Amino acid sequence: MVASLSLFLSACYSKPSLPQNPKNGEEKIDEQGNKWVYNDTGGYWMLYSMMNGALNNSSSYRYYPSSGSWTNNNGVTVNPPQNVSQSFYQKPSIKPNSSGNSAVRSSGKSSSGKVFSGGVRSSRSFGA
């Protein structure tokens, strides 16, 4: 009960962020009012910054989620704009476990692709 309640509350209070698998032309607005539009062909989010409450098309950027890099209108690599929250556009990172090794998300599959189960099957049959 407590675990499901905390999961529900974290879902209600989580900050908005860019989707992991966006569709071409998908639009998002961040907490600062900046407009983000996904370009599937280029693999980037086009960011139109808000300045003084209005969209400033001359101050646009491209964010490439696959590399985490940014470019300006001229295609020059730049640092992320200051009016954009990192938590909005960056994927959550996997933190190392206590031994210092990278944590691995378990999929239930071995490296061979076979699925292993911890359950025990009974050889007894029930019914008819």
Image (tube, rainbow, N blue to C red):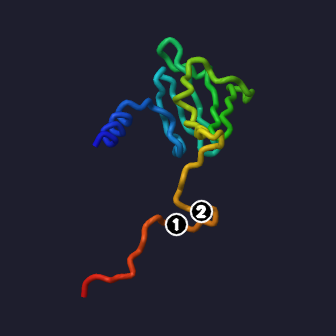
Q: Counting other residues with Cα less than 10 Å from the Cα at mark 1, is it few (<14), some (14-19), or many (20 or more)?
A: few
Q: Counting other residues with Cα less than 10 Å from the Cα at mark 2, is it few (<14), some (14-19), or many (20 or more)?
A: few
Residue in the picture at 33% in, 34% down: 9
Closest to the observer: 72 or 9?
Answer: 9
Q: Is residue 78 left or right of residue 25?
A: right
Q: Residue 5 falls in which quadrant of the image?
A: top left
- Of mark 2 and mark 1, the one earlier in the sequence is 2
Q: Residue 49 falls in which quadrant of the image?
A: top right
x and y percentages locating residue 89 in the rendered image: 55, 32
Q: Which amino acid, by three-letter code, is at mark 1? A: Phe
Q: Quadrant of the N terminus?
A: top left
Closest to the observer: 34 or 66?
Answer: 66
Q: In the structure shown, which secondary structural element does the residue marked by tag 1 occupy?
A: loop
Give the numbered dot on residue 116: 1
x and y percentages locating residue 44 in the rendered image: 62, 38
From the viewer's perspective, is residue 21 above or below residue 60? below
Residue in the picture at 56% in, 22% down: 84
- Residue reaching furthest top? 52
Residue in the picture at 68% in, 26% down: 73
Q: Quadrant of the C terminus?
A: bottom left
x and y percentages locating residue 61 in the rendered image: 63, 27
Circles 2 and 1 in contact, beta carbons < 8 Å: yes
Q: In the structure shown, which secondary structural element does the residue marked by tag 2 occupy?
A: loop
From the viewer's perspective, is residue 84 above or below residue 103? above
The residue that label 2 is drawn on is 110
Q: Which amino acid, by three-letter code, is at mark 2? A: Ser
**How far apart, in angstroms, are the residues tagged by discs 2 and 1?**
7 Å
From the viewer's perspective, is residue 36 above or below residue 59? below
x and y percentages locating residue 70 in the rendered image: 67, 29
Residue in the picture at 28% in, 82% down: 126
Give the numbered dot on residue 1: none
Closest to the observer: 83 or 55?
Answer: 83
